[in-house]
Every structure is written in structure tokens, then in C-alpha cells.
Amino acid sequence: MNSVQRFLQTLLVTITFLSLATASFAEKYDLNTNLIVIQNIANDGMSFVIRKGRVDNIVKGQVSLFSSKKISFTARAISITKEYSQWIVTDNNMRVPFEKGQIVTVNYSPERVWLEIPKILGDAKYKQMLAEEEMSLREKQFQRYDNRFEFFYGKNQGLSESTSSSINNDGTRTGDTFQFNYAIPINQTFQTIIGFRYDLDLLTLLNPNVEQETKRMMGTAALKISFNNSWSYRFSYFISLGAGFGRSETSIQDTVRVGSAMLLPSVSLGLEYKVSTSQSLIFKANFDAIQTDEEFADGFQQSTDQTMFGLSVGYAF
């Protein structure tokens, strides 16, 4: 046998050994590394819901082992949909010891688990793999976006402004913004947002010294694009592009002019911090271009074009 043949035989034996070892390792750790999130718990504490259903080969009547760091128990599947299943504790004297949103371990073959427990309890690699999988699942929880409500309060500062049929455009505009949104996710990156916005502005003219108060009420719509980062799954950045249309009313001393207001475009750059899986704090900077067409009681019309910069803080739930 020459050296080439010996080398090929050695290589074949090595590949065979590695394949068997890999298969054995995969089978070993496939027994008890299924992490799931408790979606809901019944009021009587006897049953709970997980996001595993028919597509995950769950069948009615199936018995599985559920475990946390403190306790393990068996439960039976009593109701199954395509993506969800409801489980009832097999011990009638026991209540579900988990909380909604808790990450636990499930094993679909309890009879095999009891044979493996002595091996895996002291296995450092197993514990490390389980910790990594739990962290990955927790990140997915925080990165998930559901339909939600958003409230914002902001302070605005005028950047530029011009009013038709007016020779006095020299002034300072400041204002407050209150906004209520309903966000609908398209996927993990894009969200559509519909909402209502109320603006209260004060324009102080210098010559003559006159104050104008403007109120705007607008329906709004926007597209939001979110970007995750690599240093913390609780933070994400976003940019949004929106528009709005509604009613405008300006008071100048004893006169009032009323008309329409158009917001186009409204651009926001922001940072979102996930307080929990369902609540967030949002900080953003806004650039708005607003056009109003208003009319006095005597029929005289005026149009105003303005740009504004603002900072807002919001709460989403």
C-alpha cells in the first residue's frame, strides 16, 4: 500500500468519525433545546398558550415537558391552530408556574428527557448553547413590532416663512405639537402610520409688534423605516416620511382667518428605546413644510408657506 492510499484511507476514516460525532452531538442537544415564549395564561391558571401549532407538528393530546430554571412539569395539548396551541397541566392540583412573556424550555419527548438529565445538567457546552439560544429568542421578542398606539409631544421653531399680500414677514414663530398615531407594521423594517396632529403656534412680528396665534388640526399618514443596531437589541433607529391635511385658524388681534393646512413633507429622524416587549420611548427630530390657505370674514385670502424644525418625545404601547 503506497502513501497515497494510506492517506485516502485515513481521510475517509476521519470524515466518517466526524460525521458520526456530529450526528451524535446534534441528537443529544436536540432533546432539550426548544425554547418558547408563553403567549398567554388562562384565568384559572390551569392552561397556557404557546406559538407552536400544526405547522410545528403539534397534535391534540400530545404530552410534553415544560421547564424553567425552577420547575418542570408535563402538560397536554388540548386545542391547536395553525400557529398556536393551548396546553393544560396534567396535574390537577397544580397551577401554571409561568408568567406571560416568560421564556421556557419545552421537550416533546418527555420519556427520553429523564434518561438524558444526568448527562446534560453538568455539561458546560449545553448550558452555553442554551444561554445563547435564550438570548437570541429574547432579541427577537424585542425586535418584533405589533400594531400599537403612539403619543407625542413636541416643541417647534420656525426656520422660514412667507405670507402673500404681506410686507411684514420679519418675526419669530414657536409652537407646540400634540400627535396621536396608530402604527401598523408591514414587516420588521417598514411600518405604516396614520394619526391626528394638533399644532399651536405663536408668531411674534417685530414691526409692528403683533402676535398671531395659529391652530392646526390635521389627519396624517407616514411610512416609517426602522434600522436595528449591533450593540443593543433594545435600541433602534428610524426615519419616517409623512404628509397631512386639515384645518387652520389664525387669530390676529380681533380678526380671525380660517382655511386649510397641508403638511408636505414631514421628515423625522429618531431613536426608539424598548422599555419592554410592548412599550417604547421614542425621541425624534422633525422637519416640516406647511402651507396654509386662509380667508378673513370679508373674503380676503392669504397663503402662508413655512418650514419648521422640532424635537419630540413619545410613548408607544
Image (cartoon, rainbow, N blue to C red):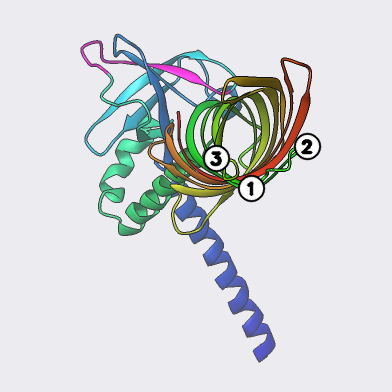
- Find the distance from the CA under tag 3 to the CA under tag 2: 19 Å
Q: Main secondary structure of the magenta part?
A: loop
Q: Position of residue 214 (x, y in %)?
A: 59, 28
Residue holding disc 3: 209
| Residue at the limit of the structure toward the front, as seen here | 208
Q: Nearer the viewer, residue 26 or 50?
A: 50
Identified at 53% across, 65% down, the residue is 18
Identified at 46% across, 45% down, the residue is 139
Residue holding disc 1: 170
- Which amino acid, by three-letter code, is at mark 2? Ser
- Which amino acid, by three-letter code, is at mark 3? Asn
Residue holding disc 2: 164
**Is 178 left, or right, of 305 in this rendering?**
left
User: Which range is magenta?
Assistant: 83-95
Query: Is disc 3 surrounded by few (<14), some (14 to 19) or many (20+) residues within 10 Å?
Result: few
Give the number of the disc on residue 212. Answer: none
Q: From what the image shows, is residue 254 above or below residue 225?
A: above
- Find the distance from the CA under tag 1 to the CA under tag 3: 10 Å
- Which amino acid, by three-letter code, is at mark 1? Asp
